[in-house]
Amino acid sequence: MIDSQRRALFWILLAAAAALALWRLSDILLPFVMGMAIAYFFDPVVDWFERRRVPRPLATVIVIVLFAAVLTTLVVLMVPLFERQILDLAKRLPALGSQATVRLDILSQRLQREAGVPEEQIQTIQQAVGERSADALNWLLGNVGHVLSSGLAVVNVLSLLVVTPVVAFYMLRDWDRMVARVDSWLPRGSTDTIRAQMREIDRTLSGFARGQALVCIILALLYGVGLSVAGLQSGFVVGVIIGALTFIPYVGTIGGAILSVGLAMLQFPDWVSVGEVALVFVIGHALEGNVLQPLLVGDRVGLHPVWVIFALLAGGSLFGFIGLLLAIPVASVLGVMARFALPHYRAGSF
């Protein structure tokens, strides 16, 4: 009994120390976390080369070079388009604000004329909408600023470009050796149990990470192209950003739909064009829920969408951008551990 308590105390203290270190070092961890994620993501590819008798160091070089080439090509092709559309959207923001005010005045006059709503009540509604819109914008800007100041603004672009590839290369080259070293540290009496749980964690993380990445890429292209075809100005960059945010269940899609339909209502004079923009999200959400998620992700993560949202918000609040990156992996690990512990708890005398 005393040994069990000591073991439990050891693991609790170890987890607390890891959380404290992550919190204190979160400002400098981004290139290391990114390098580790790249290594974890591409380890099966390097293993594939190894099975074809390619030495692991050479296979690692091939994978890193190919990844860098694809990423560089995407940056060269996408950055000019993104820059042009973002600048265009920034220039149009004052006009969009004025146009929103005009539309709101027209709507208030129609309500007063057709529905008989008193003018004082309409003014109260207008004031409330303006205040809530300002509060929402301030909240959004404040949270974005907090995330950026906690991560990307501290770790500059040079460190990402230099440190991340180095970390990814060495971790990818030595991945099997590191796994074997950690395996040698396991307590011999619990080796089989820990290995089984680690395999379950790996299955959960790998399935979710790779599947969700493909879902985000497909939806980013779908929304970007769809909004552009629908005629929404800056539609491609808006669609790509919304698609990238779909790793947050429901929030990314619903928030993106509200933003895009709102921009469409300010841009288009007719409701048909607004409906075309809304139809893009109806198709995208149907495709995501009925095809992409079941096919590419399934129930691998084993977490309810509410817990996923909570994990992302908690991780971002506690650790900034690093917390957003680590939220789902940590939540997945905790989920695997909880599913393992609950049957033992139910079967125990306590």
Image: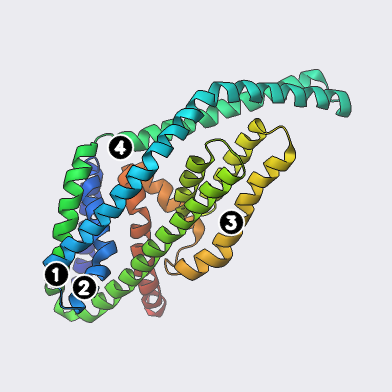
The disc, 4 or 3, on the residue closer to the chain's N-terminal end is 4
Residue 260 as seen in the image, left or right of residue 300 = right
Question: Which residue in the structure is indicated by mark 3?
Answer: 285
Instruction: Find disc 1 in the rendering and name its residue.
Output: 56
For mark 2, what is the residue? 49
Closest to the camera, between mark 4 and mark 2, is 2
Residue 99 visible here: yes
What is the total number of numbered labels drawn onto the structure image? 4
Q: How is the image coloured?
A: rainbow
Q: Is residue 178 left or right of residue 293?
A: left
Distance in Å between CA atoms under marks 4 and 1: 36 Å
Q: Residues within 10 Å of mark 2 (few under 14, many from 20)?
A: some
Q: Nearer the viewer, mark 3 or mark 2?
A: 2
In this rendering, position of residue 187 left or right of residue 72: left
Residue at image position (55%, 67%) is 291
Give the amino acid at mark 3: His
Amino acid, disc 1: Arg
Is 267 displayed left or right of 92 in the figure? right
Which comes sooner in the sequence, label 4 or label 2? 2
Q: Residue shown at 65%/23% (left/top)?
A: 99
Eye-nearest disc, 4 or 1? 1
Q: Residue 218: where, in percent of width, then height?
A: 47, 57
Query: Marks 3 and 2, how far apart in space?
Result: 37 Å
Quadrant the C terminus occupies? bottom left
Mark 2 / mark 1, whichever is N-terminal? 2
